[in-house]
Structures are given as C-alpha cells and as structure tokens.
Image (cartoon, grey):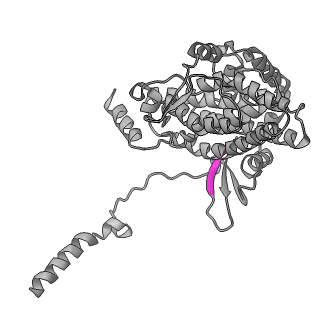
Amino acid sequence: MIYEVFRQERKGQAFQHAGSVEAADEHFAESYAREQFGRRGESVALWVVERGSIMRIEEFVDELNRNYHRVDGYPLKEKLKEARERAVARDR
Amino acid sequence: MTEQEQGFLEYVQSGGQVETDDWMPDEYRARLRKFIEMHGNSELMGVLPEREWILRAPTLQRKLALTAKVQDEVGHSQLIYRVVEDMGKPRAQCLADLVSGKSKFHNVFHYPTKTWGDVGVIAWLVDAAAIISQKALLKCSYAPYARIMKKICWEESFHILHGRDVILTLMNGTDDQRGLVQEALDRWWGPLMQFHGNPIPADEDPMLLWRIKSQGNDEARQQFLDGYVPQIRELGLTVPDPELRKDEETGRWHYTEPDWDELMSVVTGHGPKTEDRLDLRRQARENSAWVRSVLLAA
C-alpha cells in the first residue's frame, strides 16, 4: 500500500506534502515515515495517510459564474481610471 | 510532432511543470522514466563501494557516519523508485531489471575502492559532482521528481561535509595518509571527468529540450571544475591532468578529453566491479525474499 506523508517543519507552520512510502500496513508505514522524513530533526510532526483515503478534487466548475467570490469580479482598475478622468474633467 | 505535443513542449519550455496524471507525450514519459529509474539504481548501487568500508572504518565515529550515509542513499533510492512506481513501473521490476543488467547505473559505482582514501574522495568529490546534477533537477519539468530532489539535495550536502572531513583529517596526518588521498584522486579523476557525460549541444539534447534536465553535460562539468579544482589544489593535491587550466578570458576550463569509450563500456556493464556488485545485489535480493513475502502477507 502507498502512504502519503505530510510534514510540519516547525510548530505553527502548515503541513506540506513530503513524499510517499510503500508499506504493508500502518505499523510499517509509521516506521518508514519516521526514518524517511523525521530522523534528522527536519520535522516536528508527520501526517501519514493511506493514499486511497485522500479525497481529490480537481474540477472547479462555476456554473452560475459567481464572480463576486473572485478578484476578477471587481474590475477596479478600469473603474478607477474612469472615475479619475471624470474628476479631472469636472475640476477643469 | 502533433499539435498537442507541440503545446506540451512549449509549456515545459516556458517553465511549466507536469504531474503524474497529466497528459504527456510518449517520448517524454519514456525518457523521463528511464532517467529517473537510472537515478534510483545509482543511489542503490552507490552504497556498495562504501558499504565495503563500514567494517574497516578507522574510528567508531566514522563507522557511524558511513552507515548513516549508506542509509541516506538507500532512502533516496526508495523515494526515487516511488516516483517511478507512480509512473507505472513497480519497484520489483526495477530491481529485477537492475540485477539482470537490463537497466543502467552511474559509471562511478562500477569501480573498486582500494583504500580509505577512496572513501574520502567518493564522499567529497563524487557526491559533489552528483549534487551539481541533482541541483539542476530541482527545476525538472516533472514535478513529483523535482519535489523529492529537494530532500535528496539537502541530505547530499551532509555527505560532502563528511567527505571533506575525512579528506582534511588525512591531509593533516602523516605523509602516508596524504599519499592515500593523492593516489585515490589519481584513480578517481578519470571517472569523475566522465561522470557528467559527453558534451551534447544544447539544441540536440532531448533531456534539455523536454526540460527534464536544466543544464547541459559540459556545463555541469565546468561547474564542478570551477567549484572543486581550487579546493583540491589548496590542500596541496595535484589534479592528474597536465592539460587542466582555466582560460581566464572565456572563463572555461580546458582539460584532456575524458575517455568516452571507457564511460560507454563501464555503463553498459563492463566496469571492473560491475559483476561483483550486481552479484551482491542479487544475493541480497534472494536472501531477503522471505522477509518481503512475510511482510506482504501480513
């Protein structure tokens, strides 16, 4: 079985994917993960997860085009340009 | 080249990275897998010359450091074979192809280690040459490989420390000890100069084209000479190449043409220690078969 290993370098930091180990069961996966990713003090914590238990999401369909959730829903640059030109024209 | 392949090529050439499940051209996949597999083989075979010295290490501290280095290198081969496995080739098959001589491993691991001086030169200079190639793989277009190279490069830098420490201790010792280092350097210089491979023009090197590597062979060798010839010379050692000099105008090193026939012969399985080391690997594999079967049955 393949186990994915995530490591935390220092307390408070986010866990990052470190690599994977192949092991017969959780017991061996723990010991391989410790050896591969922890023996030099490079990690303060590890997450070891069987690959099949990871839910993977890769498609982000936005059927309703809800652009108000995103930066591109707020085209400030053009609007600001227009507003500035308007202000200059008014002052003139 | 199809339009899709052309698009892929442009993507990787502009710095794009690929994940395991992404579409990739067959040629890219084949070259990549062969290259990564050879790297995995080399990490595994690379421990054998050093393993010969664990029982003969001069002090307990050295024995422990050498054992740790061997553990690191085997760990690297495990990580790298995992990348190969995710590309579809099981580790057992990689190992079977290795011991049958079907797949290759790096030239420097086909040679004998005659004295403790060789151990120092290997850990210092062979690892230095290797780390130059490996650092250039941090930008590999295949992301799972590039990611794992980060850990590998980090550990390799410990090995260079260990190697330098062994060399400096010998150089500060007796004339006999200094002699061991010079003799080892004389033995290893040829294989070291062959290590990065024969020069291939950048636009003809498919490994560069696909951005599997980010550095040409001769570029890597120049970087090695730049970094290490001054360090070798400052210790009072002599590089065994009368032609070796740096052209101050171009900034490039001139050297005696490495023996490319020797390189070809060695990597195709005709090195002085090829058979012995593959035999040892075969025996180890047979002797540990029962352990694997018990573990997998668990």
Q: Position of residue B243 (x, y in %)?
A: 56, 22
Report the magenta residues as a range.
A16-21
Image quadrant holding the C terminus of chain A, namely bottom left
Q: Does residue B68 sit above or below B42 in this rendering?
A: below
Q: Does residue B75 sit above or below B281 in this rendering?
A: below
Q: Where is residue A52 in the image (x, y as percent from the top left)?
A: 63, 46
Q: Is residue A66 left or right of residue B269?
A: left
Image quadrant holding the N terminus of chain A, namely top right
Q: Residue at x 44, y 52 (%)?
A: A59
Q: Residue at x 72, y 59 (%)?
A: A45
Total numbered labels: 0
Magenta stretch prevailing secondary structure = strand
For residue B298, say whether it is visible.
no
Quadrant housing residue B117: top right
Q: Residue at x 71, y 57 (%)?
A: A43
Residue at the far bottom: name it. Answer: A91
For residue B158, say whether it is visible.
yes
Q: Where is residue A73 in the image (x, y as percent from the top left)?
A: 31, 68
Q: Nearer the viewer, residue A40 or B95?
A: A40
Quadrant housing residue B58: top right
Q: Which residue is drawn at 68% across and 42% down?
A: B156
Magenta region includes residue B148: no
Q: Position of residue B123 (x, y in %)?
A: 73, 35
Q: In this view, does B254 lie to the left or right of A63?
A: right
Quadrant housing residue B104: top right
